[in-house]
Every structure is written in C-alpha cells, then in structure tokens.
Image (cartoon, rainbow, N blue to C red):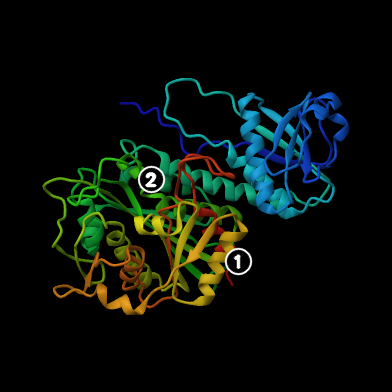
Amino acid sequence: MRSTAPAVPTPLPAIEVVPTPHRSLPTVVVVADGPAYGPGRDRLDEAALAAFEPTGKTGETRQVGAAWIVGVGDGAAKDWRSAGASLVRAVNEREIPRFQVLLPEDVTAEQAGAFALGLALGGYTFKVTGDTPAARVKSVQLVTSAPVADAVAEALVLAAATALTRDLANTPSNVKDPAWLAGTAARLAAGVTGLTAAVRDEKWLAEQGFGGVLAVGGGSSRPPRFVELTWRPKGSAKAPHLVFVGKGITFDTGGISIKPADGMHLMRTDMAGGAAVIAALLAVAALNLPLRVTGLVPCAENHVSGSAYRPGDIVTHYGGKTTEVANTDAEGRMVLADAMTWAARKHSPDVLVDVATLTGAMKISLGVRTGGLFATTDELAAQVIAAGAEVGEAHWRMPLIEDLADSVRSEIADVKQAPGGPGGIAAALFLREFSGGLPWVHLDIAGPARAETAYDEVVPGASGFAARTLVRFAQNYR
C-alpha cells in the first residue's frame, strides 16, 4: 500500500542575507522593548500603529497596514529565536509565501542566527494526509549590511538537523520499522563526502553477539538493524574522536511488560535519540568539522508475541556481559548496552555520548523542556550543558549516586536491568557498566523529545531535541 507520509527530509524555508530591501516583498520591522523600532518605521501605517500600540515584547507579531512588526524583547538570543518562530507562524496563517525582515543595524551574528533558526523551525509541520497542504512560507530575506551571513548559514544547518530529527521521530511506525530507519539514514548519508553509512542486519547482529538488540527485537516480525555512520574528513587521522550512540526503538509496546494504552501511540517517537544522532552526523558533515565522529543507532521494535523476551531472561550482550531482565519495557538500555560496548571496543573514542528517550522518571524529575544529563567528569558535564545553552536546549546534570551502584548487580547475572529505586539514576548506572571506562555522557531526553504545545521554535509532536546539542558539542570539542 502506498504511504502518504511526507517525504524525509521536510523542506524548510530558504533564508538568505541580503544588503538591500526588495521593492515588492512584504516587509517586517523589528521592534525591541520600549518600543524601540529598527529600520522601516516609515513603512508602518500610522493609524493602525496608533490603534495597536506595540510594546516590542518577545514574539509580539502583528500586521500593521501593508507591513508587519515582530517583537524581540530584550534582544537575547532566546528572544530572537522565539520572535522568528512567532513571525513565521503568523505569516503562515495568511499564506504569504515570501517576505523580508529589516534587521537593526547593530544586529549581532548570534541574534541573526537565532532569528533564522526560529524562522526555519517555527512553522514546521508533519502531517500524513491525502489533501493538498496549505501554502506555507517558502523564502525569507534578512536585510542587513552586518556580517551575519556565516552565522545564519550555520543556524540553518542546525535547523535542518532539528527538522530531520522531528521527521524521523514523527514518521508513523507502520512506515518506520528498523529497516526503514536504517535505510533512510544510509540514503541521506549517500554521496556526502567524508560520511559513510553501514547497515547491519539480524544475521550480523547474531554473529557479533548483540544479545540486547536481538532480545528486544525478537518479538517483532520486523527484525532489528544496526546503523553505523562514520565522519572522517581529510587530514583527521590524529584528530579527536567522538562517538554518539542513539536509542532507535521504532515502536515500543513495552513488550510482555506491556504499557498502558493511554499514550502508547506516542511511542513512534521512542527512537528520537537515534534520530538526533543520525541528524547530528549529517550536520557535522555539512559543517565539515575537523574531527572524527561516529554515530551508532541500534534499531529495534519492542513488540508482544510468542518470541518476545521475558522478565527473568538472562541476556548476553556484545562483549559477553550478562543482564538479568526485570522489565521488558526497560528496553532502551538493553540495545544501548550492545552499541556502547561496540563503541568502546571497536573505536576507543575520546568521548562516548549516548542519547535516549529512556525513563519516565526523568520526565517527572525535570518536566518536558529540560533533558537529564549524567557524566563521568565535571568538565564533560559543563561542556555539554554549555553546548546546549548556546543552541537553545536545556540540560540539567543529575547525579551518578555511588551508594546506588550496587543495585544494578544481579545474583544470577552480571547486572540487573531494572533494579528499582530512582529510575533515571538506576538506568544511568546500568549504562555506565557498558561505557568501557571511557569519558561518558548520558542524555535522557524522555521529557523534551516530545511537545504537546508550541513554545519558542518547538511545535507539537517530536521536538528534535538534542541534535543541536550534539553538533555544538562536536564544534566546541578540542
């Protein structure tokens, strides 16, 4: 049956920096708190302006005669990002395909980049429909003589990574099985200079002993896959090497420890961590970063059947470590354990980062706009948190409590998969057992990976969270 799911990746508006305004394009004037008007105040209809009385608060968007205004508040990067998103949403409602924004003369590269990112992502939609989609913004010109073009171009790469993460996570699971996710990653990587993709099937997984991936995927008629994306630019043989590992559960019923029906439909996004890794590798290549980066995504569907793995099973992972299964709905850590051991033994990277929609406990702890971060060193934690802050993604460091470390020990296996206690911390302590002693960061994005309402540049559905953090961390790493 032909799918009506949108093609991946979703096209984003084309955004370019130009030195002079266009005569005929609809014009947007920037207003800061005060209100303080940027260039183009004379283009606004005075009668409409007097009736409206703008404040310049962040995201305030209004058509004033033939032109528009958008508020940027105090002018922080977050304000500009939110303003861009609010503007594109408002213009989309009027089905205006093209417009221009007159930026203030003193606009900074950081502000322009944040604004472009908001413009690119704020109007994102993903809808499976046979109808003709409504007209949306196709292109935006940012009018300024300030040297901001490079920052805008970089922001658009980050926006594309976020949008691709959303695309992959939003794709319904009747389309998105492990083979589809792995094949899409390989298709997108094909032809990108310096980036290669390898997709391994269930036979290879069995030969290598990826017991966690095979156990989780064993209950589905759609077998698991393992994706390895490799970025190796010229001259990088002695450069630092980062490995990103992302959970790729294309649908999660919970297995025999089945989930409640309420909310299970959202489990199509349970591979958001894997999607972020795939998108990050493509962005790393687009930015031509001068270091080595490997992306690993174990892909499986956690289903219920006679061949599903069971509570009480003992699973042997790649590398030989054994896990006592307590709850088949704690499947993410099972597949990550194999991939992390593969990363440590085959690649010996300078840093290992895993990202996963892992625990509901983290969502309860930090809410839905902040990711949980666990790290083996203060320096690594600070670097990742700073990278996230630079690109508008919030992470909060959580403790690896040593008093709880013994809880992941099993009496009949090496480790116990779900020992009880504080769920997010227990999961992190379990994963640490498979980090090979490497400098390691674990990102639990169960909360911010999905959104119920629009805020800032985020829209309902998959948010694309963590892709930008991974890219900026790689950009900043020395």
Residue 452's place in the image compared with 379, above or below, is above
Number of numbered markers: 2
Mark 1: few/some/many CA within 10 Å (<14, 14-19, 20+):
few
- The C terminus lies in which quarter of the figure? bottom right
Q: CA distance from mark 2 to mark 1?
A: 28 Å
Q: Earlier in the sequence, mark 2 or mark 1?
A: 2
Q: Are marks 2 and 1 in contact (CB under 8 Å)?
A: no
Query: Who is closer to the viewer here, 49 or 383?
Result: 49
| Residue 188 visible | yes
| Residue 359 visible | no
Residue 220's place in the image compared with 110, above or below, is above
Q: Which mark is residue 476?
A: 1
Left or right relative to 288: residue 185: left
Q: Looking at the picture, which amino acid does disc 1 mark? A: Asn
| Residue found 49% across the figure and 56% down from its top | 370
Q: Looking at the picture, which amino acid does disc 2 mark? A: Thr
Residue 266: image location, x then y, percent: 35, 42
| Residue found 17% across the figure and 72% down from its top | 413
Which residue is label 2 attached to?
A: 269
